[in-house]
Image (tube, rainbow, N blue to C red):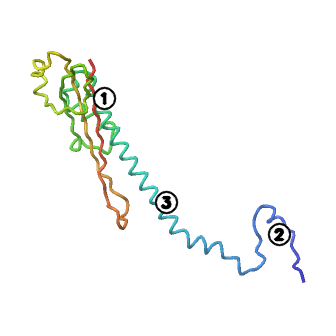
Amino acid sequence: MAQRRKESDGLAAFCGRRVPQDRSESGQSILALALLLPFLLVLLLGVVELGRAAFISIVVSHGASAGVGYGAQSGTTAVNATGMITAVTNDASYVTAANTTATYGCTCDTGAGTSCSGWTITPSTCTNISSSCSSGQIVECVKVTTTATFQSLFNYPGLPSSFQANGSAVMRVRR
């Protein structure tokens, strides 16, 4: 004998809901959700942790850029390490003054297009470099390095509970 459908079954089928023909299938969706929910929550938590780590890395890097941008404005701001560190801490909330290093130095460009990336000259030699750079142009550079520690919300097996985010920026001083 065929089962007779009620008028309400047609409305449920029209709305896209499946009407169970047999009562033994009625809890199957809840069971599948109960089995998959812990896995989905752990996956969501991992995505949130990766997002936080990426955010902190970006903030630390942008803080270094803000500090070097302040220092490269002029020769006066280039020697103002405190001002560069203040620019970093104002821009990057996760970076403290203790985790920021601002340096200033000079190098000689003899026409080969010297960049600031390889300079290791201390500020005291910037005044002395003019005698050794008679055939070129003195290039002043500022460099800001920043660090911040990221603490994860939970300890995951096989992964560190914290990591260090680093930022670094180098720029020529504007003249």
Which numbered disc covers residue 114? none
Residue shown at 35% from the left, 63% from the top: 159
Up-down: is 33 above or below 110? below
* Label 3 SS: helix
Quadrant of the drawing holding the N terminus: bottom right
CA separation in Å, label 1 and label 2 = 68 Å
Q: Amino acid at mark 1?
A: Gly
Residue shown at 35% from the left, 66% from the top: 158
Pointer 1: what residue?
Answer: 69
Name the mark nearer the viewer: 1 or 2: 1
Which numbered disc covers residue 9? 2
Left or right: residue 105 compared with residue 61: left
User: Quarter of the image holding residue 113?
Assistant: top left
Q: Judge the density around disc 2: few (<14), some (14-19), many (≥20) Cα neighbours within 10 Å.
A: some
Residue 91 or residue 167, whichever sits in front: 167
Residue 164 or residue 11, whichever sits in front: 164
Left or right: residue 86 compared with residue 47: left
Residue shown at 81% from the left, 62% from the top: 14
Q: Position of residue 77 (x, y in %)?
A: 23, 25
Up-down: is 2 above or below 172? below
Q: Amino acid at mark 3?
A: Leu
User: Quarter of the image holding residue 2?
Assistant: bottom right
If you read the primary sequence from the N terminus, does the residue marked by circle 1 or circle 3 appear first? 3
Pointer 3: what residue?
Answer: 44
